[in-house]
Image (spheres, rainbow, N blue to C red):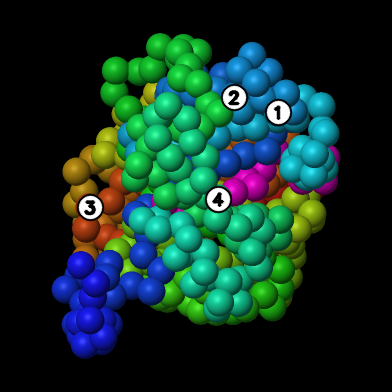
Amino acid sequence: MTETTQETQDRATATPTTAREADPFPVKGMDAVVFAVGNAKQAAHYYSTAFGMKLVAYAGPENGTRETASYVLTNGSARFVFTSVIRPATDHGRFLADHVTAHGDGVVDLAIEVPDARAAYAYAVEHGATGLTEPHELKDEHGVVVLAAIATYGKTRHTLVERGAYTGPYLPGYAAASPMVEPPAKRTFQAIDHCVGNVELGKMNEWVAFYNKVMGFTNMKEFVGDDIATEYSALMSKVVADGTLKVKFPINEPAIAKKKSQIDEYLEFYGSAGVQHIALATNDIVASVKAMRAAGVQFLDTPDSYYDTLGDWAGETRVPVETLREQKILVDRDEDGYLLQIFTKPVQDRPTVFFEMIERHGSMGFGKGNFKALFEAIEREQEKRGNL
C-alpha cells in the first residue's frame, strides 16, 4: 500500500514516543573493543586467564583469513577482539602492522552497535565525520551484518555495527571457538561501562564538539581546574554519552602543571591520541579484584591513610572499610549514590592502556572524589618509570 503525501508529512512531524525515536543517532550499546596487538594468541590467553574472559570466535588462516589472526572474547555483554598481522598484504593489514609498531598494543576500534548502520553512517558523514568504510553487508549461514566506519581521535575508529539479523558468534568470516581455559564460575565483570580517550593539549573541546555534532551525544560530566590536579600534574576531562547512557566516552587532555601528567606520558609513549583505559562494570568488585590479583593482574596501590577518614565523607557501603583497605578499592559518593572502583597498572610494557573495575550503586559519576588519590598513585608509578 502506497503512503499518501499527507501520511508522510504526519509521520515526519509526529512527536517521538521514545527517547530512541527522538535520538538523531540511536545506539544499542558498545559492540566491541578491538585491539591491534603483536601476538593475538598470547593476548587472548592473558585476557582469558587474568580477566576471566571466554574465547568464543576466531578468524585466521585455518578458516580462510590469510593476513591476520583474530580472537573474540566475551564476558557478559562485553566483547574484546584481539587481532595481529601474520603477513600484511592489504592496506588494512599494513595499517594494523604499522599501528603496533608505532603505538604498541592498543585499541584501534571502539565499535558501536546501532539499529541502522546505513542511517547512522549517513548522519555522521553529513554532520562532519570522516568516513572510512561505507556501509556494506557481510553474509554467511548465520545471517547478515551491515558495517560502516568513521574516524575519531588519533588512529581510532568507530565501526557501526548492525547485527539484528545475525545469529553467529561474532561476524561472517569468524568461526565459533572453544575457550582457551575454563572460564570462572562467577564472571569478573558484566559489561563495558565507559571508554576513555586521551587527546592532545587544546583538543578536548574539539572532540567533545565532534561527538555532539556527529553522533548527537550530550555532555554528561565536566572536570576542569582543581577537579583533577595534584601538586605536580593536572588534566581536564569532559564526558560525552548517548541519550540512553549506554555508550559513555570521557575525553581527557593534559593541563599545564609542574611536571608531566599521566596524559602527557600516555601521548609520549603511545605516539598519538588514543584510548587510555576501558572501565568494566562488575556487581562484586571485591570478588573480581581477588580473582584477578590471583591470576597476576597488578592494580594501583592506595595508601592506608586514604581509608582512615573514608567513612567520614563516603558513608557506609556494602563493603566494610577494612575489606576496601585490604583490596585497595576506592569509593566515591554523589547525590545519586556511590561507586566502588580500582585501576590496573598498564597491561603492556608501554605505560599506555590500562583498565578500571567499577561497581555502581546509583552513582553515574566517574570517581571525582578519588581523582587526587588516583593521580598520586599514578604519579608514584610514573616516578618509578622515570617519567614524572
Check disc 2: other Cα within 10 Å, few if <14, some if 14-19, many if 20+. Answer: many
Amino acid type shown at disc 4: His
Residue drawn at point x = 55 percent, y = 28 percent: 173
The label shown at residue 68 is 1
Let me know if residue 232 is in the magenta part: no
Residue drawn at point x = 40 percent, y = 12 percent: 182
Let me know if residue 110 is in the magenta part: yes
Magenta region, residue range: 99-113
Residue 38, image x and y in percent? 74, 30
**Quarter of the figure with the N terminus:** bottom left
Looking at the image, tell me whether mark 1 or mark 4 is earlier in sequence order: 1
Q: Are marks 2 and 1 in contact (CB under 8 Å)?
A: yes
The residues tagged by marks 2 and 4 sit, at their Cα atoms, a distance apart of 19 Å
Looking at the image, tell me whether mark 2 or mark 3 is earlier in sequence order: 2
SS under mark 4:
strand
Q: Are marks 4 and 3 in contact (CB under 8 Å)?
A: no
Check disc 1: other Cα within 10 Å, few if <14, some if 14-19, many if 20+. Answer: many
Q: Are marks 2 and 3 in contact (CB under 8 Å)?
A: no
Between marks 4 and 3 in the image, the one whose residue lies nearer the viewer: 4
The label shown at residue 361 is 3
Between marks 1 and 4 in the image, the one whose residue lies nearer the viewer: 4
| Residue 248: quadrant of the picture | bottom left
* Residue named by callout 2: 59
